Image: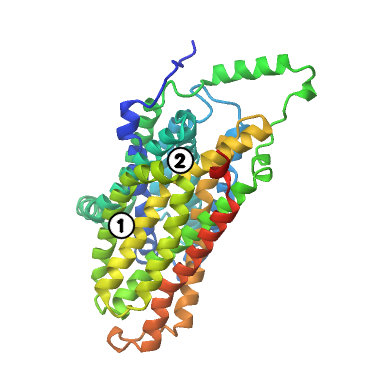
Amino acid sequence: MPEKKERNGLSTSLKRFFGVGDFGFTLMSNIDTFYATYFFTNIAKFSLGVITVMTTISAVVDAILSCLYGPFLNKIKPKKWGRYRSWLILTPWMVPFLYAMQFIKIGNGLAAAIFVTAAMITSRIAWNIPFIANISMINIAGKTPEERMTLSSTRMVWTSLASVVYSYAGPAAVSVFAAWIGEKNSYAATAFAFSALMAAGFYAHFNMFKGYEMTGEEELCQMDRQAKTAETAKDAPKVRALDAIRCNPHLLWLFLSCITKYIVLFLVNGLAIYYFTYISKNAALLTTFVFAANLLGVVASYVSKFIVARFTAKKTVVCSYFLMAVIATGAFFAYSQTWVVMAAMCAVMFILVLTNACDPELFSNCAAYSGKKLGYDVTGTVMGLLTVPIKIGIVSRGILISACLALAQFNSDLDPSMATPQLQRGISMGFMIIPAVVILIGAIILAFGYKLDQER
């Protein structure tokens, strides 16, 4: 029997708790961000050359596959519980096992490196598909811009809250597991525990979305009816998911604009330690900066829906990007004043998180535009592109940070107390001016390239 019971409007559980899966997802992914390199060097004892090859291969494969998950969801036969909703429970249960293997060294030499690399690639496949399905459900359940922004805002509140919680829970979990089963196994245990929370959260999303999407049986029946009503088989539209991108110039400009934002995010986060070490001469301030920025992110996620309701998603993002550029540029002229810079860059990160909550609404507009032009649903293809700028930002992070440090003539043997004015100014350029220029480009691209808001 079809399970679907038509739902009108958003349920209370969606309004309040949509995002608990993303809460677990953020806790889980932070283990990789903060501990993977340490595990590879200090526990697994891989050489730096091997680590570079492993991480580069996994990052490039991940970036390439991220372009394909959306088309995959659109092209594949819908599963029992719906085209997108089904994936909230089909693969997340695999993630704890695959992800934990990333932090286990079996054997030595090439075999060990291949094992860990395979774990990195397969675990990301297992979590990226439900992640995109989860975002796609915003467009399925949210029938109006207001409903989609409510879901996006609530999701970002949980995501930002996870970053705050991780500041203490992440290191604490590693310490507790280290005391129980030893440091060598503590990272795998923590990765397993946090990814299990992610899987449980996505299962909660699965239940929350019941009735908002056609089941697989219902969609197949609809497809059969559409095929029968067509005069000939060739009259029925042939689903080519990638056409959703080709027919939509607004999507291209939105995509490029999002890339600039994630370049800024990873550049600021990556260079923060250098600023506090070589300019502030107090590396411990990094913890204060990260905690304050994440706490402000929770507030930004909550207020975003009210701001968008007044100004629209596009205007909010464009104005926010311009404001980020102004604040970061102003901070550069006071780069020797640590607390001024910290306050300014926290404001930049606050605004950046605010724009994150707007992205699903902007991409949803593109999904509707492409679907209308093509005559069939392309939600997965379009919403799947949300993750690609993040991957590009990660790949570009190492290149840009290395370039900034090289231009500043950075030397790791230099005592921070002896940092030259040239080094300090160079680090500040990378921490503040380059992000300002990049995000300004993003604002211009979005302002003049993406025009769907005006057409609505």
Work out whether mark 1 precedes mark 2 in sequence or the reverse, and give the earlier one: 2
> Which amino acid, mark 2?
Phe
| Residue under the image location 25 percent in, 59 percent down | 292
The residue sitting at 52% across, 61% down in the picture is: 395
- Rendered residue at 42%/54% (across/down): 106
Q: Does 225 sit above or below residue 302?
A: above
> What residue is disc 1 on?
184
Instruction: Using the image, determine if residue 376 lies above or below residue 300.
Output: above
Note whether residue 272 is visible: yes
Residue 122 place in picture, x, y as percent: 50, 46
Q: Nearer the viewer, residue 199 or 370?
A: 370
Residue 66, percent from left and from top: 55, 47
Question: Residue at coordinates 60% horizontally, 19% vertically from top-left?
Answer: 220
Q: Is residue 4 left or right of residue 164?
A: right
Circle 2 is placed at which residue position?
Answer: 131
The local secondary structure at tag 2 comes to helix
Circle on res. 20? none
* Secondary structure found at label 1: helix
Viewer-closest of 90 and 3: 3
- Residue 169 relative to residue 255: left or right: left
Left or right? Give the position of 74 relative to 49.
right
Crowding at label 1, few (<14), some or many (≥20) Cα neighbours within 10 Å? some
Q: Is residue 189 left or right of residue 67?
A: left
- What colouring does the structure picture have? rainbow
Q: Residues within 10 Å of mark 2 (few under 14, many from 20)?
A: many
Q: Quadrant of residue 347?
A: bottom left
Quadrant of the image occupied by residue 31? bottom left
Q: CA distance from mark 1 to mark 2?
A: 29 Å
